[in-house]
Image (tube, rainbow, N blue to C red):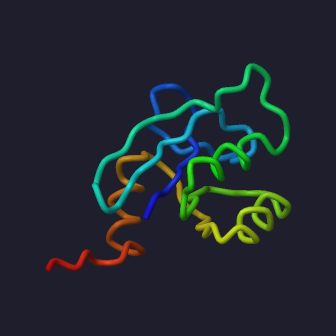
């Protein structure tokens, strides 16, 4: 599962309280257990750009503090899970997300 977390800045340490204003997202893959910070690649970020960008990355879920109704609906209509109410450090959120939401891996 590929998860996107909006970040406050280029360091990617804290979750942004405002999904729609985030220019940076920490993308974490629960299967490979790897992640990294990405910046929305537009000079000027317009409403809806973050949504389209995350969709192009094929994320499965977005972990947010808060998100507007239109953004939530846009993501959900495309099969992207929206998990709200998270706060604090991205590192802690990833650990929390994995323990609460990620499906266990199946080994052959």
Would you say 29 lies left or right of 12 here? left
Q: Residue at x 79, y 62 (%)?
A: 74
Would you say 103 lies left or right of 57 here? left
Q: Position of residue 28 (x, y in %)?
A: 41, 51
Q: Position of residue 84 (x, y in %)?
A: 62, 65
Indicate the quadrant containing the N terminus: top left, top right, bottom left or bottom right: bottom left
On screen, residue 21 above or below 33: above
Residue 93: quarter of image: bottom left
Residue 39: quarter of image: top right
On screen, residue 24 above or below 71: above
**Which residue extends farthest top?**
43
Q: How many marks?
A: 0
Q: Residue at x 72, y 63 (%)?
A: 75
Looking at the image, which is closer to me, 7 or 47?
Answer: 47
Indicate the quadrant containing the C terminus: top left, top right, bottom left or bottom right: bottom left
**Which residue extends farthest left?**
108
Residue 40: quarter of image: top right
Q: Residue at x 76, y 71 (%)?
A: 77
Q: Position of residue 33 (x, y in %)?
A: 28, 54
Q: Position of residue 103 (x, y in %)?
A: 35, 77
Looking at the image, which is closer to me, 8 or 105?
Answer: 105
Q: Residue at x 66, y 38 (%)?
A: 22
């Amino acid at each position: 599962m590929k998860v996107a977390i909006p970040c406050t800045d280029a360091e990617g340490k804290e979750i942004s309280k405002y999904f729609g204003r985030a220019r940076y997202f920490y993308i974490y893959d629960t299967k490979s257990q790897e992640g990294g910070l990405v910046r929305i690649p537009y000079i000027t970020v317009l409403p809806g750009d973050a949504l389209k960008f995350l969709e192009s990355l094929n994320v499965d879920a977005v972990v947010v503090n808060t998100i507007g109704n239109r953004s939530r609906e846009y993501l959900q209509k495309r099969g992207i899970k929206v998990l709200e109410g998270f706060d604090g450090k991205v590192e802690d959120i990833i650990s929390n997300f994995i323990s609460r939401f990620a499906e266990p891996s199946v080994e052959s």
